[in-house]
Amino acid sequence: PANLTMGSGPAKRMILTGDINLLYSRMLDRHRPLLIETRLDADDGLHQKSLSEIQRLARELPVDTRGWQIICSEIHFEWRNDEIVNVGRTVESSGKLRLVREHICVTPGYTLVKHRDPPSIDFPTWPRLGHHLVTREWDECIYRGNGNATSDCWIKLGSFPAALRSRTITSAGMSRVTESIDSMFENQTTLFWELVQKSFSVNPSAAMETSKYLKDNMKSIILDNLKGQCTFGHSCKESSKVKLYSLLNETTIQVIP
């Protein structure tokens, strides 16, 4: 990897890229003014057509170099397995799935779009606004006659499940990880696994294997999650720490004879 400077002043920092020459050539190309960054954590997934839809939307948005345009999912699948966090149980299933429509912008597939003025190899400084505040603080982008803003605005992907979001002990925010699974998960999971296998290439057997790994390594994963709390780009909620420490205590008590 090679080093590349991003931002300026106090915000300046290093990022890594695999091929610095390719990156420079793209950023200096006057025919490539569009900068698109799509975020994806290691425990989440994207629908097989999400990236093509993101790029299509980014190209069709009005050109405005003053600020950012955010693209995020309207609908996503949520996966969780209570057997992972239930210390007294073993993993015997692949977990449950449900379909979720959020009013906020969730992190998997969260995309920042910037119209640059090439040639330049300077990365613009990211907006400071958290992903959960974008739809509340910014206007919807102008697109096909809707919205009232062209910069510092947001737009959502079409009505398909664009992302697969894991609610496990790897989650920085720990939202809906330790709460009991309701009947909606039970009733919809069989159908949803068929859709997830087709659109995300994730099958129940792989989900069960992942669940067993998380269960077997729960203590070290929780400790790693705690290290990442309140660091750059991650959540900083006291409630997350409380849940993690509670699980850690349960795990420690379980393994001590």
Image: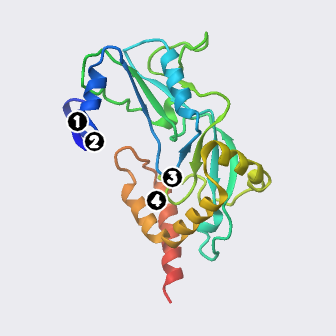
Callouts 4 and 1 close, C-beta under 8 Å: no
Q: Which residue is mark 4?
A: 241
Q: Which residue is mark 1?
A: 4
Provide residue 26's location: percent of width, then percent of height.
31, 24
Provide residue 35's location: percent of width, then percent of height.
38, 24
Pick whichever of labels 3 and 4 is earlier in the sequence: 3
Type of amino acid at the residue the image marks with label 1: Leu
Q: Is residue 12 above or below residue 250?
A: above
Q: Using the rendered image of the protein, determine whether residue 12 is visible from the camera's viewpoint.
A: no
Q: Which residue is mark 2?
A: 16
Pick whichever of labels 3 and 2 is earlier in the sequence: 2
Q: Quadrant of residue 37?
A: top left
Callouts 4 and 2 close, C-beta under 8 Å: no
Q: Is residue 250 above or below residue 111?
A: below
Callouts 1 and 2 close, C-beta under 8 Å: yes
Describe residue 108's horizontal placement relative to residue 103 as left or right. Answer: left
Which secondary structure, mark 4? helix
Pick whichever of labels 4 and 2 is earlier in the sequence: 2
Pick whichever of labels 4 and 1 is earlier in the sequence: 1
Seen at 48% across and 36% down, the residue is 131
Q: Which residue is mark 3?
A: 43
- How busy is the neighbourhood of tag 1: few (under 14 within 10 Å), some, or many (20 plus)? some
Q: Quadrant of residue 25?
A: top left
Question: Furthest-bottom residue in view?
Answer: 257
- Residue 30: mark in rendering: none
Q: CA distance from mark 3 to mark 2?
A: 21 Å
